[in-house]
Image: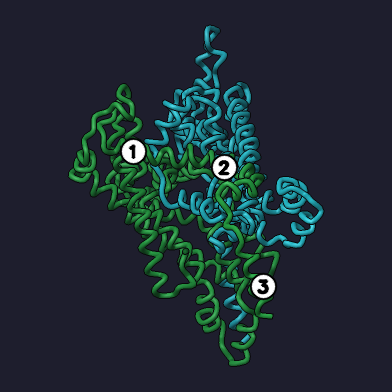
Chain colours: A green, B cyan
Amino acid sequence: MRIGNLVQKKVKYGRQKSLFDKLKENKEFLILIMPAVLYFVIWHYLPMLGVVIAFKDYTYFGGILGSKWVGFDNFKFFFLSNDAWRITRNTVSYGALFIVVNAISASVVALLLFEIKNRMAIKVYQTIIILPNFLSWVVVGFVTYILFNPTLGVVNQLLSFVGIKEVDLYMEPKYWLFILTVTNTWKGLGMNTIIYYAALLGTNQELFEAADLDGANGLQKCWHISVPSLIPLMTILSILAVGNILRGDFGLFYQISRDVGALYPTTDVIDTYIYRGIRTGDMSVATAVGFFQSFVGFALVIATNKIVKKIEPSNSLF
Amino acid sequence: MKSKKKIYSRIVIHLFFVLLCLTFFIPMLYVISISLSSDAEISRFGYRLFPNNITWDAYKYIFRNTRQLIDSYKVTAITSIFGGALSVLVMTMVAYPLSRENFHFKKSISFFIFFTMLFSGGLIPTYILNTQYLGLNNNVWIYILPGLASAWYIIIIRTFFQQLPSSLVESAKIDGASEITIFAKIVMPLSTPVVATVFLMVLLAKWNDWYTTLIYIRDSKLYTLQYMLQKILREVEFIRSVTSEMSMGMNISLDQEVPTEPVRFAMVIVAAGPTLVIFPFFQKYFTKGMTIGAVKG
């Protein structure tokens, strides 16, 4: 029998497959993946090469290759300017705030939804709260405009009704951290809640039955069973969100604040800043900022993932 | 005693949700109400929940000259549906080999695609690529090509493929079918749920797109629906040009002032209303897609 094994082994590990053989064998697979691979090469990997613009003084006439090399000058210019601190602080603050607020609000609403037994009610509520998800930020911008319009808006109507002086919210930066957070939550709550709700539906029923036998009340069941079952999902979503913490939702910041310059101190984020780079033609610095954004985001995902791996490996992304 | 407490908490919870739902209803009511008011009434009283006198002037104004509206609907519909279908095709094609054990390059291609979720060249290099090297500036293909595939959706599709019973594929191979045949004739027909989900998600994203137009398009004939909408919110002159094209070179009837405010919001109803009515019917596809994507990550 041993000799038989040996013989079998020898046959199995016969000739190593060469690259050419592998290509031939998978020829059909390769045909199938070609369009997508081509797409990623052109629209994702080629632009990565364009990062060199961040190190050059880019002009339209010089092109990418012809423009002058300036090393880290663009980065220096950006970081020493007032803008750098402002937009980075804004972007990160909003990013972190959104992660926390979204996770908490969605899980709370999901937990509440979980308590409802009437299936018709569940469906109706879900359908209604998910509606804003289908709106674009443009339409949401109209809605906030209804509220904030300096002369016709609802907020000002209410204020003057109680005797407070009207305020043009589009000229007051200090309220916008609150405004943008609430708006962002309003739009995303439906979808996020449903994701968390789906996770709750997946929890083991036996756990709840066992808890009932032990005499646990609703709140205890919620805290000890439901909440822990949401933690893995929350972790994964938060890791992905952290990687994107430097990317604001351009729609939110551009449409709701209506790109009003007076509000930039609290509403300007990295993406709106880069966008203005195209408008003004100052591409080099904007590219440097974009590179900074991608690079730091990438590092953050890796770092966060490493941290999570140390705490609870099964919750990590990779 | 216990049931009284339970009933009490039930009521509170339902009340919470009713209030929550109101925060979504009331804005819609305002939009409808403003669109049905007269400009004069709005100037006097501001935006109101229910108009004192319902006038259909704003809508009449819009439907008197619908060229821009029709153009935008056309562009948005065609690029969304066609682009969405093309996207789904390309993505299912790449997801299939990634779901098969005997694809030698599975690991490297997976990494190649997944990496794009972590790092990107940024807006400016992409902009330069699209405008100076690919000629997509002011070109309708800008709506279709740059968003063609997404690592996120590919992962969702691949997960679905991996869950199909392998016996189907095995028996087809024994019958001598090629991989492409298996993909087209066996795997795809079974994949309607995931195809529908991804298609709808891509469709929604493209349907609501205004960012692409903002960056790349100058020709008003190529405006997407949402971009046209945002222009109307911001520029009074645009409203004039949209609704009174026949005034060029003909008798300009100045007694018909553009009812700016109602027209803006009537436009919202006309441009975004159908979306709000149609997409919720497909709600379950979106929730399924997002859930799978989030859970499988």
Task: Work out whether A237 lies above or below A136.
Answer: below
Furthest residue in direction front, as rendered: A3
Residue drawn 50% across and 55% down?
Answer: A188
Instruction: Give the spatial CA distance, label 1 vs label 2.
Output: 39 Å
Could you tell me if residue A232 is visible in this image? yes
* Place of residue A227 in the rendered image (x, y in percent of width and height, measured from the top left): 51, 75
Dot 1 surroundings within 10 Å: few (below 14), some, or many (20 or more)?
some
Task: Work out whether B260 lies above or below A214.
Answer: above
Marking on residue B204: none
For the image shown, how many numbered marks are present on the structure? 3
Dot 2 surroundings within 10 Å: few (below 14), some, or many (20 or more)?
many
Verify CB contact (< 8 Å) between mark 3 and mark 2: no
Q: Name the kind of residue labelled 2 in the image.
A: Ala
* Image quadrant occupied by the N terminus of chain A: bottom right
Q: Quadrant of residue A34?
A: top right
Q: Quadrant of residue B216?
A: top left
Q: Name the kind of residue labelled 1 in the image.
A: Val
Helix, strand or loop at label 2? It is: helix
- Mark 1, mark 2: which one is toward the viewer? 2
Q: Is residue A258 left or right of residue A1?
A: left
Chain assignment, label 1:
A
Marking on residue A36: 2
Which residue matches tag 3? A117
Which residue matches tag 1? A260
Helix, strand or loop at label 3? It is: loop
